[in-house]
Image (cartoon, rainbow, N blue to C red):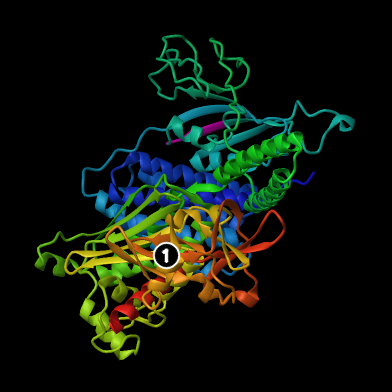
Amino acid sequence: MSFPDPIAVFRTEAAELLEQIEAGLLDLNVNLGDKDQVDAVFRGLHTLKGSGAMFGFDALAAFTHHCETAFDRVRKGEVPATQELVTAVLEAKDHMRALVDTPNGDHEATGEALLASLRAAVDGANNAGSSGPAKTAPGQNHFKIRFSLPQNAMANGTNPLPLLDELRELGECRIVADRSAIPSLDLLAPTDLYVSWEVELLTTQPRSAIDDVFIFVMDEMQLEVITVETSVAAKAPAKTEAPVTASQPAAAPQPAAAPVVVLHAAAPAPIAAAPVETKQNKASENVRVPAEKLDELMDRVGELVIAQSRLSQLAGGSGDLQLRAVSEDVERLSGELRDTMMVLRMVPVAHLFSRFRRLVHDLSHETGKTIELVTEGESTEVDKSVIERLADPLVHLVRNSCDHGLETPEERLAAGKSQAGHILLSARQQAGEVIITIKDDGRGINRERVRAKAESSGLIPPNASLTDQELYQLIFHPGFSTAQTVTNLSGRGVGMDVVKRTIDALRGTINVASHPGEGSEISLAIPLTLAIIDGLLVRVGDGRYVIPLSAVEECLELSIEEDMRSRGRSFISLRDSLVPFLRLRDLFRTGTKPDPFQKVVVISTGSERVGLVVDQIIGDHQTVIKGMSKLHHDVATFSGATILGDGDVALILDVGHLVAEGQQQEAHLRAAG
């Protein structure tokens, strides 16, 4: 049995913590007085520091300690939260990520510069908060602490020494180790912990500061804290609080002649008068599974679907009723397994959208524009492989909206708009696709400038008749840019080309809409999954092909007479509208004669439709998508291949490419007519 690499596990958990810290900082930047977000960021930094020290990432722990200290001062009200402080910690968070990824790298100079910015931000916040009346320093508190960790604590990665160091940082501290539980040498286990500690602490910090030290080990340890009355006049017995466990809130103070006691233990503590409830550990609701294992399982499910298709074909041609019954059971089970596997691979787009809050925050500072990002449909789920490949295209589109789309605050006010520009990032499901939309309320796309650039680049002839959608699609051409100056954000015409190529590789489509002075909207239609899809199996000549079922609108018959009448026009009349169609026999050069009754499969992407003329519609087919070889990477008509039940290979048609080709054919015919 293989165990996961603990360093890899830490890096995964550290990445999640850094995302939580960034989200908390961005929320705090919107509302600087939000105490809950201050506490959330502090807890995240505290956890990252402790985990880093536990796994040997000492540089990370030391650097994070400074950020934690800064937020501890904010949490205690010593300094106010400011945008400068949030920005400094955001930049420090990026450095923490580098310390996690490359702990042995040369990060010292960068770290010193970031700490200088952090100190300047804290000092500025301190000066800003010092204009009010001076606060009197709280009196010194005297605590006696007794604690012990579980015997297997060190084997599980908990080091008690950093806990003692954190107690020393709170004030004057005297620590005594209790070694009475250490067994004889023949019974001693090197990985077990037998030592407990007694600590006497004089500090100006409140009782809660001690809880913060033990906050992440409190549920499994025994902790006893006694508050010793230090006032000269307080010779009477001190007040007592009832014992508290991790699952029980503190009770009201009782007038008993005993010291204050707070316990976190699995058994009743010796000093507590009342019994302590035992915290029940809940079973974990989530299991962390490496992504490559999910991919491997998905491959096995795909092979099972292919084998099931083969079995169904054999059973269909056999008169054995028992074989047919078994085939139906296997088909049902494989279908359920496929659906379950698809759900396991689905992740909400919130994981993708959350990245752009930081991007917009940084671009707002870089461009000097006030930008507000709104997200909708974060719960929409997409296959994880699709999410991973959508990140780069969306970065380019959001940057374009911020740089080209939105005006400066002065321009917006002059145009009668609000000073802050708005960007909407939304997602929704539609049939077998997810539609992701990037919308801004900026200046819109300059249609004349796009046309002039396209004509000067030779992409279109002068005075060519193009629809708005056809014209806007030109912005995705390699090297195309209408920017008058090149900046570090955009202007080289590379980003939109990346968007186009990535979406095409995902078998998706792009629709662009724009209104001058009102803004632009770019919609990406992406398949929900890239692994297994429902397809329509068709025959053209002697070959079989698969059309993604999500793109199919309807099927109709094309007789020989209608086929002959449409020669030279390639249009069919469909409910008072003309739809162009492609003869796949001619496109694929099959060299065969058409069947007497051909079929037209009408497919669509967005608002564009085209018909595909095939010889026979065989039926639905669960399609396990296999990638094309490198020798066929430039064959744009096909997006992949699949293995049929009889072992033959069927190519999967690229719907987006075929629709575009059909629309081009329509444009040429209209121009010629």
Q: Can residue 30 be seen in this view?
A: yes
Residue 165, image x and y in percent?
Answer: 58, 43
Q: Where is residue 273 in the image (x, y as percent from the top left)?
A: 54, 10
* Along the viewing direction, whichever of 536 and 398 lies nearer the viewer: 536
Q: In this view, does 48 lie above or below 189?
A: below
* Picture quadrant of residue 50: top right
Q: Which residue is drawn at 54% across and 42% down?
A: 166
| Depth order, front residue of 413/143 | 413
Decide if residue 29 is on the left or right side of residue 542: left
Most distant residue in the front direction: 561
Q: In this view, does 364 lie to the left or right of 98?
A: left
Quarter of the image holding residue 542? Answer: bottom right
Which residues make up the magenta segment?
Answer: 200-204
For residue 663, side relative to residue 520 (left or right)? right
The residue at the point 61 percent across, 75 percent down is 632
Residue 309 highlighted magenta (yes or no): no
Secondary structure beneath label 1: strand
Quadrant containing the N terminus in the rendered view: top right
Q: In which quarter of the image is the C terminus?
A: bottom left
Residue at 49% x, 40% y is 170
The image quadrant of residue 285 is: top right
Point 45% across, 32% down: residue: 208
Residue 113 sits above or below residue 290 on the image: below
Q: Mark 1 belongs to which amino acid?
A: Gly
Query: Alpha-carbon neighbours of circle 1 within 10 Å: few (<14), some, or many (≥20)?
Result: many
Spot occupied by residue 362 in the image (x, y as percentages of width and height): 35, 63
Q: Name the residue under label 1.
A: 611
